[in-house]
Image (tube, helix red, strand yellow):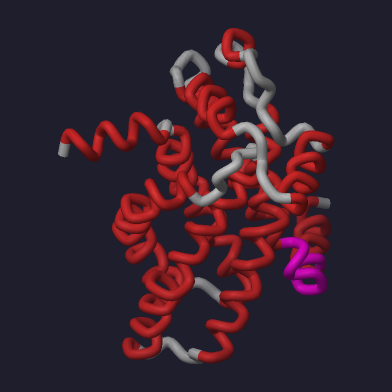
Amino acid sequence: MLLTRGFKVVNAMRKRPLLFNSMVYGFFYTSAEFIRQSFSKTSKSTQQNIEEHDDFAGTKGPILMQIQEICEILDLVDEKNDAAVRSTVYNWPQLKRYAVYGCLLAGPVLHGWYKWLDTFYSGKSTRIVLKKLFADQFVFTPPLIVLFFTSMSLMEAKSDILKECRMKFLHTFQTSCGFWLPVQLVNFLLVPTSLRVTYVSVASFCWVNILCYLKNVSVVEYIEDKDER
């Protein structure tokens, strides 16, 4: 019975790799954020997010206003003046934002990227692997970080969707280099092409906890920390 179900899953993966990879990536991403919230429900991170939302409220521009309205309808925007409640329960709008980002943005983008990368740089020689590592970390990762922070700020209904990205991009990229370079070395050397995004999703289960921490540090706190250095 289990073997039959396993074959069905494998066949589904082969028939609809984009859908499967997107769902897997969204699942791991959202699960990691859920676990992070489970260990930090009494911390100040959620309150900081709400305070920042108040500072940035009032999205400018007709297109951004329409997107903000859609996000509010989908309950992706944190409610104001609800810090006392959210400090004791899960931040469901935030979990939804990670699900949207993982399933609809990062998952499809990663699927297309690794499909192109494996086609353009075929083989497992040292030279090919190093080219893939360089392209993945220094060509693909910077835009992906920008996509993460700007899309999250957009779903949070912040008026300046680039401010947080400007403040946290460099530190996030430096941290990603230390984590993803060894992870991707194993990926390109040992992992089959069809399982690349799934492998990255499992690694993201660890990485997203780091990313969520960086995301939940308030901009004001981040500026003060840089000034002290």
Name the residue located 44 percent from the left edge and 17 percent from the top edge. Answer: 43
170 and 89: which one is in front?
170
Q: How many marks?
A: 0
Whether residue 93 is situated above or below residue 163 in the rendered picture = above
Residue furthest toward the left? 229
Q: Residue placed farthest to the top in the image?
A: 84
Main secondary structure type of the part rendered in magenta? helix
Residue shown at the point (63%, 41%) measured from the top left: 30
The magenta span reads: 12-20
Q: Estimate the x, y position of residue 201 in percent, counting from the top left.
A: 56, 56
Please say whether residue 222 is one of the residues in the magenta stretch.
no
| Picture coordinates of residue 146, whole percent (x, y) | 50, 58
The answer to whether residue 177 is left or right of residue 120 is left
Quadrant of residue 136 within the rendered picture: bottom left
Nearer to me, 155 or 13: 155
Q: Position of 166 compared to 17: left or right? A: left
Is residue 15 part of the magenta span, yes or no? yes
Res. 84 image quadrant:
top right
Closer to the camera, 16 or 176? 176
Q: Vertical placement of 214 versus 175: above or below?
A: above
The image shows residue 28 at horizontal and vertical percentages of: 60, 47
- Answer yes or no: is residue 127 visible: yes
x 56%, y 48%: residue: 161
Q: As rendered, which of 28 and 8 lies closer to the eye?
A: 28
Q: Quadrant of the C terminus?
A: top left
Does residue 2 appear left or right of residue 116 in this picture?
right
